[in-house]
Image (tube, grey):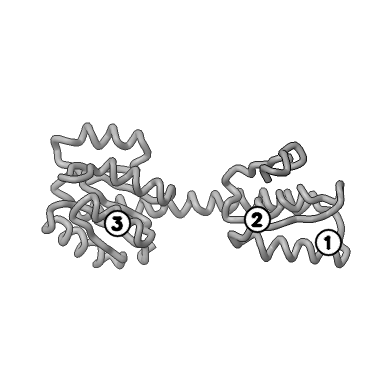
Amino acid sequence: MPDAKILVVDDERDQCAMLERILKLEGYQVASATSGQEAVAALEAKPFDVVLCDLRMPDLSGVQVFEQARARSPEIVFIILTAYGTVESAVEAMKGGIYDYIEKPINADKLVRVIQHALETQRLKRENVALRQQITATREYEKIVGSSKAIRHVLECVSTVAGTGATVLIQGESGTGKELVANLIHASSPRASKPLIKLNCAAIPEALL
């Protein structure tokens, strides 16, 4: 993924500039921030694939920036930059979901290897999720039996709305398969890996709906 977007965060401007140069030579799109708050603002402004972040900074720690980044993008790869004296803290931080740490002074070859491996891991995870979603959607499609014009029209509608964030109202008499269609829309959507919450509206007072 040479076109991957990387955010470099370090309160030492020279360090930021050096890392930017190394990564841009590798073909990555690189932005930098010299404080935790600036990093959070950058993460709010646009998505990144990888964040390289110093562990200790004056305003926010690397772990605090990680928490903000993960809240916005669960898939983001977060790598800590740490001095020798804080390696133990970096290792501890990895238990919370941080991908890896790189010890200062930064070795350019090691930095590139770690990022390449991280991006490959990220790519494989995305492919795995997509494959699982595809299998789940296929199973849901198989539950809808029929090839009539009406059924084909329903499946076309499902295909159209599944990729959007639109609210969908499914109408039909009891036993016509409304829940099957709802399951299929969910299984075919980008949110397929998230739970589908089902509520029995008939059991809820009309005033609360």
Give the crowd class for mark 3: few <14, some 14-19, many >=20 residues within 10 Å: few
Residue located at (37% from left, 62% from top): 46
Q: CA distance from mark 2 to mark 1?
A: 17 Å
Look at mark 1 in the image and give the residue it sits on: 151
Q: CB under 8 Å between callouts 2 and 1?
A: no
Q: Earlier in the sequence, mark 3 or mark 1?
A: 3
Q: CA distance from mark 2 to mark 3?
A: 33 Å
Residue type pointed to by label 3:
Ala
Left or right side of 166 for 1: left
Residue 190: x %, y % from top left: 57, 55
State whether residue 69 is above or below residue 151. Answer: above
**Viewer-proximal residue among 17 and 171:** 171
**Viewer-proximal residue among 93 and 107:** 93
**Quadrant the N terminus occupies:** bottom left
Look at mark 3 in the image and give the residue it sits on: 41
Q: Earlier in the sequence, mark 2 or mark 3?
A: 3
Give the crowd class for mark 1: few <14, some 14-19, many >=20 residues within 10 Å: few
Residue located at (71% from left, 49% from top): 183
Look at mark 2 in the image and give the residue it sits on: 188
Farthest residue, direction front: 207
Residue located at (33% from left, 48% from top): 78
Residue type pointed to by label 1:
Ile
